[in-house]
Image (spheres, rainbow, N blue to C red):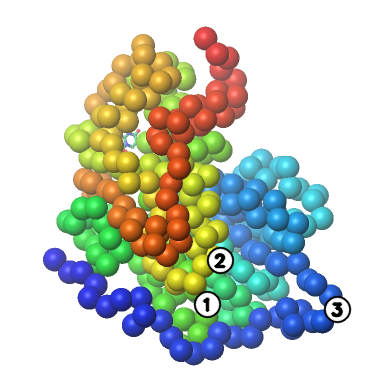
Amino acid sequence: MATDSSNEEQQTTSKPPPLPSPLRFSKFFQANMRILVTGGAGFIGSHLVDKLMQNEKNEVIVVDNFFTGSKDNLRKWIDHPRFELIRHDVTQPLFVEVDQIYHLACPASPIFYKYNPVKTIKTNVIGTLNMLGLAKRVGARILLTSTSEVYGDPLIHPQPETYWGNVNPIGVRSCYDEGKRVAETLMFDYHRQHGIEIRIARIFNTYGPRMNIDDGRVVSNFIAQALRGEPLTVQKPGSQTRSFCYVADMVDGLTRLMEGKSTGPINIGNPGEFTMLELAETVKELINPKVEINMVENTPDDPRQRKPDITKAKELLNWAPQVTLRDGLPLMMEDFRLRLGISKQ
Ligand SMILES: NC(=O)c1ccc[n+]([C@@H]2O[C@H](COP(=O)([O-])OP(=O)(O)OC[C@H]3O[C@@H](n4cnc5c(N)ncnc54)[C@H](O)[C@@H]3O)[C@@H](O)[C@H]2O)c1
Ligand SMILES: O=c1ccn([C@@H]2O[C@H](COP(=O)(O)OP(=O)(O)O[C@H]3OC[C@@H](O)[C@H](O)[C@H]3O)[C@@H](O)[C@H]2O)c(=O)[nH]1
């Protein structure tokens, strides 16, 4: 079983980062921090924008092609003087002047990333290359939202960052898993070769308000099904596990990583682990005890277990999740209820 024997110090570089904008050195004019969020119209991205906009010294630029995201997620910021929204596909070069880049653009739900796998790879590879090229030109720090899927169907449990993973390179999920693995490689190559300041977060399953109702991921499916009184579709065998992180905790972890000193990769996720049957039972109990649970066929290469080892996040970022699944599910349910137009019973 392959594990990484090297530590983060060996992966880093002594090369100085490219110079930031001269504005940062100006004596009389205190410029705002300009922050680019790619994929900022999506689920995690829009919550991140909310947090960044709370700081009056931040200007936020979102670029998004709206494949899975929506302007609706950002409607409270449209026309705000410190906010800009640009329709743009990250597979095309982008010229903006920024100090930090949160690079999230990529479909995240399996049904969406498998819909056009070649585009998913292009987004991960060419999109990340373009954002790294931008970071190099303007001297910006860049954070990549990688994924627990880089561990594939993991043979080590829970997964520490030193684990190299067990990924099928030619499977139907590879466009995403391998795409993110190449994106991580590009980040470290730009760091070592050009001194770019990088941060890599390995995000584990995240849930919360604003997920697409038809997103296809398990928490959104179960909540929408329970509210509509439809059977919860548990994919076989139902004993596969995931660990679910509430979106506010995730955004807190991402900003700590960006502002901290460590390049990562760092796992950000909630170690509370559930089988899909346990998740279905919990949703049923909390939202609609009358719904049935239906066992349905699964898709190829579904990871059988997943749980983050968050020792590194605790030590280096002083971060740990605060919201349990039982506390987070009702918050998401309220948002879904409003959007589905279903009143309280
Ligand atoms: N939510 C999770 O559980 C999870 C887990 C691991 C990693 N991640 C990563 O976090 C990031 C955000 O995930 P999310 O759950 O918010 O997904 P999401 O689908 O809601 O958001 C992704 C956003 O990227 C945009 N986008 C996609 N391709 C693009 C392109 N080529 N150019 C410009 N914009 C593009 C979409 O329109 C959308 O707004 C992704 O990089 C994903 O891989 C998420
Ligand atoms: O209706 C459903 C949907 C999904 N599932 C199961 O729930 C589990 C989780 O599936 P999801 O589609 O929510 O997400 P996955 O964990 O497979 O992938 C996710 O992993 C981390 C991120 O990078 C992405 O957000 C996504 O790829 C799987 O075992 C799946 O078989 C169901 O039992 N029923």
Mark 2: which secondary structure?
Answer: helix
Q: Looking at numbered disc 3 in the image, what kind of residue is underneath it? A: Phe
Across and down, in percent, residue 234 comes to: 28, 30
Do we see residue 235 in this rendering? no
Residue 291 left/right relative to 75: left
**Label 2 CB-ligand 1 distance < 8 A:** no
Amino acid under label 1?
Answer: Glu
Helix, strand or loop status at disc 1:
loop
Q: CA distance from mark 2 to mark 1?
A: 11 Å
Q: On the image, numbered disc 1 is attached to which residue? A: 197
Which numbered marker is on residue 28? 3
Mark 3 to mark 2 CA distance (whole Å): 25 Å
Relative to 290, is 224 above or below?
Answer: below
Q: Amino acid at mark 2?
A: Glu
Which residue is tagged 2?
259
Asked if 213 appears above or below 159 in the picture, the reply is above
Q: Where's residue 74, x and y in %?
A: 67, 45
Pair 2/1: label in front: 2
